[in-house]
Image (cartoon, grey):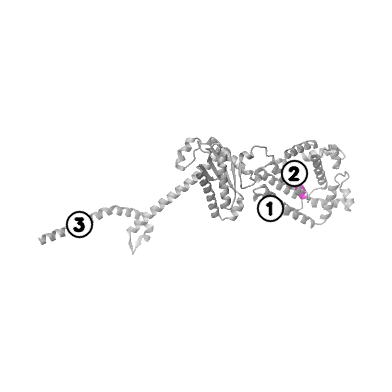
Amino acid sequence: MYNVWFIVGLLMCMAGVAWIVFVTRRNYKPIEAIVSRISKYSQTKTSVLLHGGKQDEFAFIESALESLLEQASSFQQQHREDLLLRKAYLFQQLMEGQYPSHLEQWNEQREAMGLPDLSQPQIVNVIEIDKYPLFCEQYPQQDQYLIKFALKSVVQEIAAGQETMLWTEWISASKLGVLAAAEDQDPNRHVATLLEQARQWVEEHLKLTITVGIGEKVERYTVIPESYEQARAALKYKMILGDNRIIHYAEVSGEDRGNAFDFLNLIRSMAQSFRLVNKDWQEKYSTLIHNIEQNMLDRDGVVNLADYMMYSLGREMSCMAKEFQELWLTEGQPALRNALQSSDTLEELEQELGEALSALYDSILALMEGRNHADTIQKVRLFMEQNSSNPDLSLNYLSERFGMNWKTLSKLFREETGQKFVDYLIELRMTHARRLLEETLLPVQDIATEVGYSNAISFGRMFKKLMGMSPGDYREQAAIKQQKFGN
């Protein structure tokens, strides 16, 4: 019996070993096939998978699985980024009216991408970071991205707390577009309250300010671009109304805000006074700023006026000596351009432009004082201004009074002023005439005599040649402008 049981035990052990070998080989075959296929694509990395001079197949499998997981994670991240880019692109297309062509096209991907329901009324708003050039100077690029992310997130969180559906996307470096569902009876007020909370939070926690333009409610998705343009138009009045506030399009769209071309004569007169080193340029500059504020010009109108001012000053300086032209190109024009670009509000623009103009005026004055005969020509000009009504005023008359040859006086006068004597005298008389036409009710004949013309017909002909209209028409237009400024 002992031998029998011994043989049976031995046979059982042998059968167990045989079963283990069989099962192991059967289960290892798929793994072996996987390893074989992977090894064909990783010949360049076999050195990483060697352990003690022999190939570690389990390490190989582990590395392959890690690579697959990394690729899957990378694909998921890429998908999320692509989704964000697609949403931003769709937002831009929606604002510009390029998409969708029909509502069903939008609804096909609305749920998958988390898009709003365009069958409901919508309001478009635009949030702008105030003093954006200064913002870029104060913060490195990484911090700028972080602050913009915080701004976008806080708007969304405040809206979620009030159960309001918002879609926010950056439409430019400094502007955040906000599409809000208008479900309440007074949606403009509701959205304004929400954005006012966001404005206060940003001012308190992010150490910067924002200005918000709010468009009108639209019932159909096809009219969303109009609300978008209204919000952008409202933001342009930040120049007049100030920053760090909410601006409704309805507040700035109801009245005639004036025409920038109404100010061109005043700008030309200021530029001429500047070239002639007359201190009255400051009074004209203040009048220009006051009229802009009274007429509620938007940013585009103000920028156009500033550009025309720089053009007029450049044209006047081009008539002067070479050193004055170089002063304008190297100091004056760049300073004025920087002042315009760095100003968000009319108050800031008035200060920045005023300082730049004052610095340029002082430089011109110092340059003139250092030139030969500058003092004499300055006295001549002052005498002409005080005696412009004298019909006998001429080069010969002035040369006798100041003890100088008339040819020398004419040459020096042109060098210092950049104008011929006759042109300067006519301009001086016409400036005086315009002031009398605007401020008095004197007949044209009396005004002609007052400015040095014995013949009213000659005066009228010269006035129309320079101003493009008769003295009577000019007086009528001046009265209309004064009435509008008074209102």
Residue in the picture at 75% in, 46% down? 284
Q: Residue 266, labelled with which disc?
A: 2
Residue 352 included in the magenta stretch of the image? no
Give the spatial CA distance, label 3 vs label 1. 96 Å
Q: Which mark is residue 423?
A: none
Report how many numbered discs are placed on residues in the image. 3
Q: Looking at the magenta stretch, what is its main secondary structure? A: helix
Residue assigned mark 3 = 16
The amino acid pointed to by label 2 is Leu
Assign a secondary structure to mark 2: helix
Tell me, for residue 335, which label it has, or none. Answer: 1
Q: Mark 1: which secondary structure?
A: helix
- Image point 41% across, 52% down: which residue? 71
Q: Is residue 237 left or right of residue 313?
A: left
Please provide percent x and percent y for residue 82: 47, 47
Residue type at the position of mark 3: Gly
Identify the element where label 3 is drawn. Answer: helix
User: Considering depth in this image, is 234 or 457 the residue closer to the camera?
Assistant: 234
